[in-house]
Image: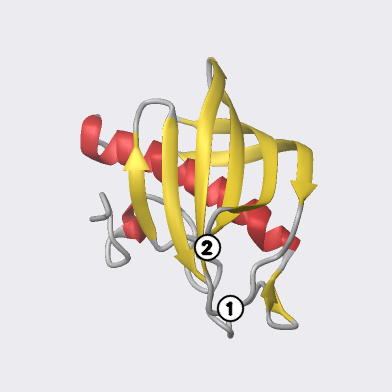
Amino acid sequence: MTALVDNENILSLIPQRDPFVLIDELIERTDLICTTSFNIKEGHILVANGCLSAEGLIENIAQTAAAGVGYEYQYVKKTKPPIGYIGAVSKLVINGIPPAGSMIKTTVEVTNKIMNVTIISGSVFLQDKLLAKCEMKIFINEET
């Protein structure tokens, strides 16, 4: 499957920079759903004891949401992507943590939007196994 935005261009969609980037490609994006992939490297700052940390999984979900918004602004609205801030993480479930060297896929679905607040539901998969899921409340600053 060809990525909508590949590794060489993914940084144009998100505010994070190395060593804190946790997505490689934007695979799918609709008005409500966004999917990314991430190849976990052994030396990544959020890899400990050979596995991506739980905090890394949460940040991966947040960056997937940011990539979806970034794509909308850059490619649809033709303007600079806004900065978003995590307001709350809820309903967090961690079923497992992925080892370095593996590729995870993350899907975020927008469940509600009210003014500058977006509520998303995110899920991280290793192959077909659900590793983590949560809901996030994200505040979008459109004045950037």
Number of marks in the rendered image? 2
Q: Which of marks 1 and 2 is nearer the N terminus?
A: 2
Q: Can residue 34 be seen in this view?
A: yes
Q: Is residue 68 left or right of residue 1?
A: right
**Residue at image point 34% right, 58% down:** 10
Pointer 1: what residue?
44
Q: What element carries label 2?
A: loop
**Residue at image point 72% right, 67% down:** 53
- Residue 41 x/y as whole percent: 53, 79
The CA distance from mark 1 to mark 2 is 9 Å
Quadrant the N terminus occupies: bottom left
Q: Which amino acid does label 1 sit on?
A: His
Q: What element carries label 1?
A: loop
* Quadrant position of residue 20: bottom right
Q: Residues within 10 Å of mark 1 (few under 14, many from 20)?
A: some
141 or 128, nearer to the observer:
128
Q: How crowded is mark 2: few (under 14 residues within 10 Å), some or many (20 or more)?
A: many
Depicted 136 relative to depicted 115: above or below: below
116 or 47, nearer to the observer:
47
**Residue at image point 70% right, 40% down:** 134
* Quadrant position of residue 126: bottom right
Q: What residue type is labelled 2?
A: Leu
- Residue 31 x/y as whole percent: 37, 26
As drawn, the label of residue 22 is: 2
Q: Is residue 48 left or right of residue 123?
A: right
Depicted 120 relative to depicted 23: above or below: above
